[in-house]
Amino acid sequence: MMKPTLIVGMMLRFIDCIKTFDIIYATTSGGPGYSSETLNIYAYQNAFYYFKFGYASSILVIFFTIVIGCVYLVTLFRKKVED
């Protein structure tokens, strides 16, 4: 009975982890070198430091499709577990 709840919780936590921007940017701004740089930080730097707004928006569209794909896979897995 707990499997659907745990799967939804894991999905929401995964989305939260992959979208992390504020903590990383406030503490290290991408880290020494590029060690803690995520796609969000990379897109932000391209948009507002290098003024490549088109490139940054295309990175974020790809990021959005990755997140939607992961949610879709977890939803399929959840339906399979419930059946």
Image (cartoon, rainbow, N blue to C red):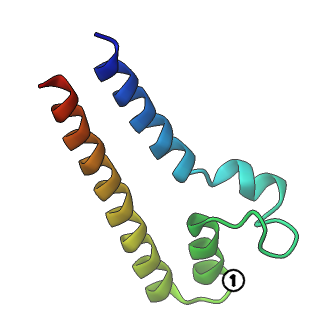
| Horizontal side, residue 22 vs residue 67: left or right | right
- Residue 42, position in %: x, y? 62, 74
| Horizontal side, residue 18 vs residue 70: left or right | right
55 lies above or below 42:
below
Is the residue marked by circle 1 packed among few (<14), some (14-19), or many (20+) residues within 10 Å?
A: few
Inspect the image, locate mark 1, and give the three-letter code of the amino acid beneath it. Tyr
User: Which residue is identified by label 1?
Assistant: 49
Q: Residue furthest left?
A: 83
Q: Residue furthest top?
A: 1
Tell me which residue sits at (78%, 53%) in the image.
26
Question: Which of the 4 image quadrants contains residue 5?
Answer: top left
- Residue 69, position in %: x, y? 29, 58
Question: Which of the 4 image quadrants contains residue 29?
Answer: bottom right
Tell me which residue sits at (17%, 34%) in the image.
80
43 lies above or below 55:
above
- Residue 33, position in %: x, y? 84, 76
Q: Nearer the viewer, residue 75 or 31?
A: 75
Image quadrant in which the N terminus is located: top left
Question: Which of the 4 image quadrants contains residue 51?
Answer: bottom right
51 lies above or below 81:
below
Q: Nearer the viewer, residue 78 or 65?
A: 78
Tell me which residue sits at (11%, 25%) in the image.
83
Element on which disc 1 rests: loop
Tell me which residue sits at (48%, 42%) in the image.
14
Q: Nearer the viewer, residue 3 or 17?
A: 3
